[in-house]
Image (cartoon, rainbow, N blue to C red):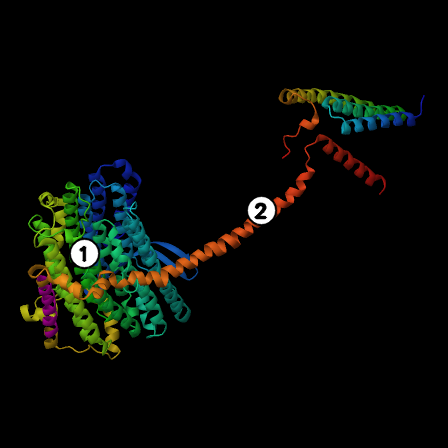
Amino acid sequence: MFEYVWLIPLFPLIGVVINGLFGKKIKNEMIIGGIASLAVFGSFLVSCGILVQLLGMPGEERHFEKTIFTWIQSGTFKADVGFLIDPLSCVMLMVVTGAGFLIHLYSIGYMHGEEGFYRYFTYLNLFVFSMLLLVTGNNLLLMFVGWEGVGLCSYLLIGYYFHKKSAGDAGKKAFVMNRVGDFGFLLGLFTLFWYMGSTHNVWTINFRELASHADMLPVGGVVTAITLFFFIGATGKSAQIPLYTWLPDAMEGPTPVSALIHAATMVTAGVYMIARMNFIYIKSPTTLLVIACVGAATALFAATIGTAQNDIKRVLAYSTVSQLGYMFLAMGVGAFGAGVFHLMTHAFFKACLFLGSGSVIHAMHHALHHEHSDADPQDMRNMGGLRKKMPITFWTFLIATIAIAGIPGFAGFFSKDEILWQAFSNPHHGEMNIVLWLAGACAAGLTAFYMFRLVFMTFFGKTRLSDKAYHHLHESPFVIVFPLIVLAALSMFGGYLGVPKVLSEFFTGGAFPNYLEHFLDPVFAYSTNFMAHSGHGEGHHSVALEWGLMGGSVLIACGGIAFAWALYIAYPAIPGRIVATFPVLHRAVYNKWYVDEIYDFMIVNPCKAFSNFLWKGFDVVIVDGVVNGVAAVVRGLSGLLRHVQTGLVHNYAFSMALGVVVIVGCYLFR
Amino acid sequence: MLALNNYLIVSAILFAIGTVGVLTRRNAIVIFMCVEMMLNAVNLTFIAFSKYLGNIDGQVFVFFVMTVAAAEAAVGLALMIAFYKNRESIDVEDVNLMKL
């Protein structure tokens, strides 16, 4: 099966070609959507085959490289188009193709009747192609191609409703902010290549070759610079402080796009990149601390904003930023496996949440349409009581919400708890561990609060719709509901792939191992050995402490839920009173702590002013001035010479005769 | 038999008259006739030298010049008719479309 790895990105590419070139002629939505979904399903099947074969091998041998052809060869620099299969890329393949297929299916129902249906599926397939290239590429440059490709597709899909100015602006914002990050990625790539080549004569960008030479990398120093550059790239792509503001705006795109690109796959590219290069990151304690702090700060900061938003998709967007912060927190404390585990479970429950919100918006849109109301179908203040009308959407949404809130037994609990435990007990950051854990735990409480606030405002209580609109509410069709059910099931049971050791030992006597961690171990073997040999040891491990922290985080989550219940079900008057008591605080949170305004003031506006100066000061005056000046000089000279051309035949004949006389004269009197 | 000088002087006078005519007259046909006069002045020179040197070449050239003059007359007159149809004039000072 390994030999066919190139089929995985090829299928979506075929979909792009067919729908991109002939989609406009085909017109039939079932054929267009069918081609796109089948392409991704084909990739999914091949990925499954590869996973099965990988599982059949002994742990240390679970890697495979297939080079298709040499892409660039210049002196000592060589870049192949080749694929790397190992447990890490295999997990990513399953997430991307699996979630991708479900979301393609969902899109057929959700995008029904939209203008540019074929355009949507072309972009979506192109995205899947780029993402697969990103996660399977065997060298940094190929990864960068995928990295840029997903950024492009993100831009195209955010701006899908391009006739809306806000959508176009959001697309541009996402693209520009991603470019800032990509620049960091490139700098990291250059520095790494140059350093390894010039000091150790290892001219390579291939992941496995780099890993086998990882011993040559010093601790700290230039490695800190390299890893920080790469991390800048990750903050752009994965929406971390300071480059996170594009993600909430990206909700202008169609909802399935938000589920696929801005929750489940693309935004996790930064996490994947760090996990892929863990052997470099582990060598720089400074960078790890920076990543852990940024991750924890983002998790907490985005969670606070999420508590005051009224747009259902914006709450989920801030939740995504916050959960990505958790993943980076895991990376920063050296718990790469836990980060990838959270990436996976997050893909399940967040895709389910986004698709569920899409189902709600879909129904609200139709209900409001019947009434000719121009109320916002995404505003939770217009919803309420939807659970009776949309039972399947409600139950799947509730399951995913429980999963993200971290209630024991559901997927989010296992991964989030693993990260919090690692943040507390890791050997890297000493005294900072408490702060990191505290930030993560607070964010967990806030997450439970705002997610249940969302559920209560949307599905519970009395409806805030008019009777007529409420009457027209109905459950979404099967293609929309089916992916919800699958994803809800995954949110429920997906966590059992990574059950922590203490739980497993307590309940089953260790018979139920942490499958995912064992599966991923070979990828992170170098980092594990490095830590073991550098004398840091294992950090402090205590079963009692782990139980205590676990109980603590469950309590925090339950507290958040209870608080949400009290505020939005039991005593609905309280939120208004809180707002009235702390108007300044509420306004600040509601307006996202004014970060966009601060960025506008500090960066965007000075940039604009400088560009304006270059335009009106330099371009118009100097560049145009030189061009127009040359033209004016020529014009003036020719104005003088013009008088020679009188247009009178006599003058011409006379000058001709005069010329003859002069020539003959010259000849005679020489 | 007159001396060569005399022929050349007559020829020069004819050529000068022709040149001055071309430069000063406005009527295109008159200019045209002046050009013919200049050509014939040259012809006279050719014949005179031919006779003087006892060489037939000059006379051959004269035939060529006469042929070219005939062709020129045909083309020139056609141009003038075309011009007259457009401007109802054959005054060369009206030929000034190219002037700004």
The residues colored magenta run A548-565
Image x and y of residue A593, in percent: 25, 64
Q: Residue at x 67, y 43 (%)?
A: A640
Amino acid at pointer 2: Ala
Subunit ID for the residue under disc 2: A
Residue A152 in view here: no
Query: CB of mark 1 within 8 Å of CB of mark 2?
Result: no
The correct choice, above or below, for A542 with respect to A129 in the image is below
Q: Position of residue A60 (x, y in %)?
A: 22, 66
Crowding around mark 2 (Cα neighbors within 10 Å: few <14, some 14 to 19, many 20+) is: few
Q: Which residue is mark 1?
A: A310
Q: Quadrant of residue B30?
A: top right
Q: Where in the figure is residue A137, as x and y percent of width and height?
A: 30, 57
Q: Label 2: which residue? A: A631
Q: Nearer the viewer, residue A397 or B70?
A: A397
Q: Work out which quarter of the rendered image holds the N terminus of chain B and state it.
A: top right
Is residue A246 in view?
yes
Confirm whether the magenta stretch covers residue A561. Answer: yes
Which numbered disc, 1 or 2, marks the residue closer to the eye?
1
Q: Is residue A447 above or below residue A253?
A: below
